[in-house]
Amino acid sequence: KTIGLQVSSGLQDLSLRDRGGRRRDYHDLGINTRQAMVHVQECKTGFSGRMIKLTTNHFRLTSRPQWALYQYHVGYSPEMEARRLRSALLFQHEEHIGKTHAFDGSILFLPKKLENKVTELFSRTRSGEDVKITVTLTNELPPTSPTCLQFYNIIFRRLLKMLNLQQIGRNYYNPSDPVSIPNHRLMVWLGFTSSILQYEENIMLCADVSHKVLRGETVLDTMHSLHAQVGEERFRDTCAKELIGLIVLTKYNNRTYRIDDIDWDNNPKGTFRKSDGSEISFVEYYKKQYNIEINDWMQPVLISQMKRKSGNIQGSVALIPELCSLTGLTDKMRNDFNMMKDLAIHTRLPPEQRQREIGRLLHYIQKDDNVQKELRNWGLSFDYKSVSFTGRVVQGEKIFQSGNMFDYNPQFADWTRETRGVPLIRAVPLDSWLLIYTRRNYDVANTLLQSLFKVTPSMGIRMNKPNMIEVDDRTEAYLRVLQQRVTPDTNIVLCILSSSRKDKYDAIKKYLCTECPIPSQCVLARTLSKPQTIMTVATKIALQMNCKMGGELWSVEIPLKQVMIVGIDCYHDTVSGKQSIAGFVASLNQTVTRWFSRCIVQSRGQELVDGIKACLQTALRNWSKWNKCLPSRIFVYRDGVGDGQLNTLVNYEVPQFLDCLKSIGTDYSPRLTVIVVKKRVGARFFAEVGGGLRNPPPGTVVDTVVTRPEWYDFFIVSQTVKNGCVAPTHYNVIYDTSQLKPDHVQRLTYKLCHMYYNWSGIIRVPAPCQYAHKLAFLVGQSIHREPNRMLSDRLYYL
Amino acid sequence: MDKNLQEEFTQIIKFKPPLHKQRHQFVKDLVEKYKPKKVADLGCADCSLLWMLKFCSCIEVLAGLDICADVMKEKMHTLSPLPVDYLQPSERSLTVTLHHGSVAHKDPCMLGFDLVTCIELIEHLEESELRKFPEVVFGFMAPSIVVISTPNSEFNPLLPGVMLYRHPDHKFEWNQAQFQSWALETARCYDYSVEFTGVGHPPTGMEKVGFCTQIGVFVRKYPQTGESVQSEKPTAAVHKTVFKAVYPSLKDEKYLQNAVIGEVIFTAQIIKHRLMSKREEYGDDPERKSKFQPSVNCFSDYLGKLVVEKNMEPFFSGNEVYVPLATIFSFPKVNRLCGTFEKLCKLIAGKVPLSSDSSAVIFNIEHENEEN
């Protein structure tokens, strides 16, 4: 091993001490994108809107003035292999190095400087061997260095452990006060996410409440109930679909594993090779090691791939279903409205309660002697009051629809009522269309049709009577009808499904998106069964169908000319074929009301960038066809970027965009802005209203205090929530030659959150991101291959 | 200090499994044989023996004592309950406590144990401590069984690299005669019997050398004197508790109630779903409605076969489904948890929506499946 002089090596080795051996930098530290953008060097803040007083869930970290962390390399002569031994030998000298230290076997961190740059210590092993230990200072780390920040995070996690919180995955949870939801056999643990980072002016702790959903049953229990539900024939497939990708806990250790495969040919009687080379059966092993009796000897074995250094797969672990408990929610559970409703009661905390829970954590930290001692030893402390500052609420947007202009109530961020009965910008007539239903749903189909005839005229949609077709409630029956009755003139197919069984939906979508490219709309019969809501439902269906056929609903004012907006999002299909899908959409017209789309389906391990380049090229060609010129400005909103992937984006994806633009022509140099959109962030903002805390109103922009100094970034709260806390969306402008003021980029972004046609209100992300998400989701969930390009100028994926 | 390490380099080649594992296995076998409920490990160091013992289902109280708090603290979190222990509380109760203190001092927290283990402990004691040790363990704690292991110095010449003692912290290492005479004297003094054995067999031809680790198993000859004797010895607490973990257990009413409520609602849901899917299947077809018979005996074997009596059938009433408690009680899992029907009723009272005569669980199905 070479002596680690660089910061990065220290960082890597340090993270080893953190459990799991994952070395990913979740906070994207050390990626400075702002320095390349001259126009935001001085100032990256906007100015428009009214001021609002906000508090957040960030707490200042305070350390003594001359705080530094000292990094030492520790060498052994003769060389000692075992890490435990290396630690034991070094810690014989606590009188020299002090009681406070962090050591991973070769790199030692101390809160104080040793007398000499090189210290030699002598120890003796139990076998009487003399060992020389050389402790060499390699780095004095200022509090803001990435290694130091990483280090703070590790120390903080130690504190959480000292508070007897249980680590599950990345976060810590309190097991002593669980909420159980027996209706669904779920248990919810309250816990905390924490990260310590350098923010605009201070190093701060961002602490948030986190809920862990756990299940009170073993994987074997789940398999049994699946067997009871689907029967022998579909059992294995269903198990794979339901279980693969889930995280399990075991009965015997405190680790989490991801289920990557199910080995049906193996069982607990099967054997494996232990590290000492001997063969042992699972039954024997668990009996011997943990005194656990495996009852069911016929169950299959779960396989979990072990990821180590730089993501290489380094073999796999076999797990026994009977000894594993599931955590988290499956897609199926997420789609279960009742379950999510029951969960939401416990997990959606309103602002005051959320802030109270976070306060409780800080209170624990403050009152625990051991924790305080540990903090003192490192010379660290926290400001126990959360940070307050001012944000801005930008003015509401006007909604335009066929020459009419509407304001909406900013409190609800919704204009369903205001625009009801107003002609759409572009209404596509339903001249020739199919309405397919089963015999049971004949009445429902008729009710829907009558309601559609009532609601469409005021929207300006011309509608003929459809071809009403009754089918058997079987997938093949639906497909046969589609094959026989869809003609090139068919505008759209409307199917009424009697159950939410996915296979029928998938088959219809697959056929109509690939082989026979016609827009389609599926509706669950149950949705139509309530007389009191049928008009609302019919209105929504009419709008959705109109969009799917290429219609336009409303617009907002976009002051920039010749601009193309791009949205990208990814969907990772963990079940079938383990492929990833990237959805790509790009605006086609001046008003940003029509969208071109492409989809990239790629197998695991393949890089996304090549596909994106081709998409951008085609998008530019299409834009120029529609506008008779090329766009002079391009905005890319990139969603689906995981924690720690920013580097890849900056170094590979952005250069590919630039390459692509260059390839269009030597005289073509549009202004490009690339913005990374992140929905899952730890930051929460609360508006101080009359002594209490409320959710900030839509349009709240935050670009100070809790943003990062090395980025051109900002937060926008664009949506409203009925209960719980609103989550701000984080925007990180990683590349920008637009020369636009930050205020304009913020405003444009907020405007685009108004343009998602499946929701007549403001959403969490710019519409192109949501469209790209919808597309990727449809392809990943149902179609599994690239949709027919004939459809690419319509929102068929809504 | 870490006594498992000391043989890692020298003896791993010789003993398979390694000697420290053999010592632990020896204790575990003893636990399997005598099924003690309360076990204390003196000189528990990195808690590895305690960790192993926490999986033994007979043990309800585990305690560790060590003179070095840091060494205990390093791995003590491995003795905490796992998330799964909370998710599926076990039948038995288990409390694990770690104390910081000396084996030469009496502390009431060390009373009441069935088995006391002193694995590779005594050779670390100073003479003065060793002198007080028998009185503390055999006189004061007075468990039914004591296990003491210590290096056999006659074996040392066979170990590469061992100069004087096997570990720099050892104050002495005894040969077989020395250990046995000390043990016999101690046993005689406190009315115990003692048997000698060991782990780490000597090489063939050198059997005279004896085991590498010599072990004495002491069994108390007089019967348990009961709690009264313990209270006669009022001793001030001298040990400091550094760790305590109470494992979730069904013996604790709180966890039992949670488990029963969970199981009752879950079982009732299964019955309700069966009933509803039957209705949905036939519901829209009036001429087939007559065929509809609520029946629950088509469950898979896993859920258990039940005897269906007339008054045990679930039924609809308006927007509500009634699932009789008697039906739910007939499910093996519920049955096992509660034991008696009365207990079931008591545990779920006020926690689960019940019919007016408290004979059935009620579900309102009006708002079900509203949206998707």
Image (cartoon, rainbow, N blue to C red):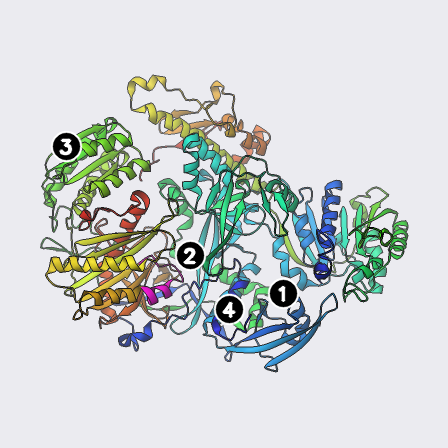
> Mark 3 = which residue?
A467
> Mark 1 = which residue?
A81
| Mark 1 element type | loop
Distance of label 2 from label 4 (alpha carbons): 27 Å
Determine the image quadrant of residue A459.
Answer: top left
Q: Which one is earlier in the sequence, the residue at label 3 or at label 4?
A: 4
- The chain to which mark 1 is attached is A
Is A412 contained in the magenta span? no
Residue type highlighted by circle 2: Arg
In front: B372, or A124?
Answer: A124
Q: Do the residues labelled 3 and 4 touch (CB within 8 Å)?
A: no
* Camera-nearest label, 3 or 2: 3
In front: A409, or A117?
Answer: A117
- The chain to which mark 2 is attached is A
Distance of label 3 from label 2 (alpha carbons): 53 Å
B38 lies above or below A356 = above
In the rendered image, the quadrant that contains the N terminus of chain A is: bottom right
Distance of label 1 from label 3 (alpha carbons): 77 Å
Residue A10 point in image, percent of width and height = 51, 70
Mark yes or no: residue A218 visible. no
The magenta segment is A639-652
Residue A13 point in image, percent of width and height = 53, 67
Residue type highlighted by circle 4: Phe
Say if labels 3 and 2 share a chain.
yes
* Camera-nearest label, 4 or 1: 1
